[in-house]
Image (tube, helix red, strand yellow):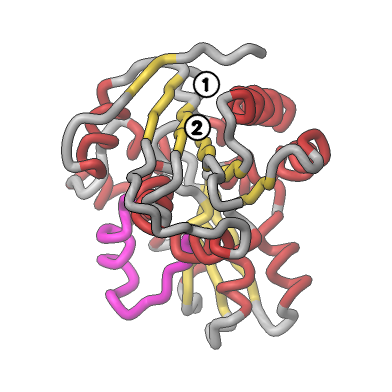
Amino acid sequence: MSSSKIGVFDSGIGGLPLAFAIRNTFPSHDIIYFGDTEHFPFGDRSAESVERFSHAMASFLHEEGCDILVIACNTASAVAYDSLKQRLNNGATVLNVIDPVVQEVCNTSATHIGVIGTSRTIETNIFEQKILASCQNKKVYSLPTPLLAPMIEAGYYNHPVSELVVQDYLNHASFESIEGLVLACTHYPLIRKDISAVFGSRFKMFDAHNALVSALRDCIQDTSSEIKGSTTFYVSDLTKSFQKTAEIFAGGAVDLRQHRLKL
């Protein structure tokens, strides 16, 4: 699939770092990003609602010509991946941000693993189930951190506010013995600095960025073409924080458009 167009979707800005990691790794491919800012945060929504929003974004991206879809949201990956894969069948390759991270956790020597994510993601217990199914020597401690994604979406990352909120969450008794931490929300890598301040710089953190880019290499073939692929951003509701964050990662202006989802 040398001419694959890659679609990436998330509830907001959380998938942007992943989208730009994909952009840098596969420069000749067109990428379309969709952030469902109108229905953010997904972590407080019912599973049925998240599944409906996810299917609407996937349908839009598929109609725009994307034959590879990356669910850049842990909550959506937890509740909508199976149904999306079944619905699209052979029409598109669908990747989630959970399975590559689980594999990375199983490849590490750390045995006591913490998991932080939205209330919906933690409620599904999907990380503990998948980790223990693949590597029985691990012990998993999960903690819902529902304020983090809205805080980051509002632009409070690398900020005194984010530092205080992260410290309050992570200074938790169940995390005293952990050797590694799964960032089970694509927003959370934006607060790596605050997390490192709690656990130390040598502490192992697992997120989807590198793991998913590696998984993408198995799906597409970069032709190393001199033609540079385009990057287009869609949101369901225009927000200043999305535009600001996208421009920070892009290092300049971005092609940002609004599209209301058909639900």
Crowding at mark 1 (Cα within 10 Å: few <14, some 14-19, many 20+)? some
According to the picture, the residue beneath numbered tag 2 turns out to be: 11
Q: Nearer the viewer, residue 82 or 47?
A: 82
Q: How far apart are marks 1 and 2 (CA)?
A: 7 Å
Which residue is painted at 62% across and 46% down in the image?
A: 121
Crowding at mark 2 (Cα within 10 Å: few <14, some 14-19, many 20+)? many
Query: Which residue range is magenta in the image?
Result: 190-208
Give how far across and how far down residue 255 sits, in percent.
30, 26
Q: In this view, does 40 lie to the left or right of 55?
A: left
Q: Is residue 217 left or right of residue 17?
A: right
Residue 73 in view here? no
* Contact (Cβ within 8 Å) of mark 1 with mark 2: yes
- The amino acid pointed to by label 2 is Ser
Which residue is painted at 74% across and 63% down in the image?
A: 129
33, above or below 134, in the image: above
Which residue is painted at 33% across and 61% down in the image?
A: 195
Give how far across and how far down residue 19 sits, in percent.
41, 46
* Magenta stretch encompasses residue 201: yes
Residue 43 in view here? yes
150, above or below 56, in the image: below
Q: Nearer the viewer, residue 52 or 20?
A: 20
| Quadrant of the rendered image containing residue 147 | top left
* Magenta stretch encompasses residue 166: no
Q: What element carries label 2?
A: loop
Which residue is painted at 56% across and 25% down in the image?
A: 64
According to the picture, the residue beneath numbered tag 1 turns out to be: 39
Q: Is mark 1 on a helix, strand or loop?
A: loop
- The amino acid pointed to by label 1 is His
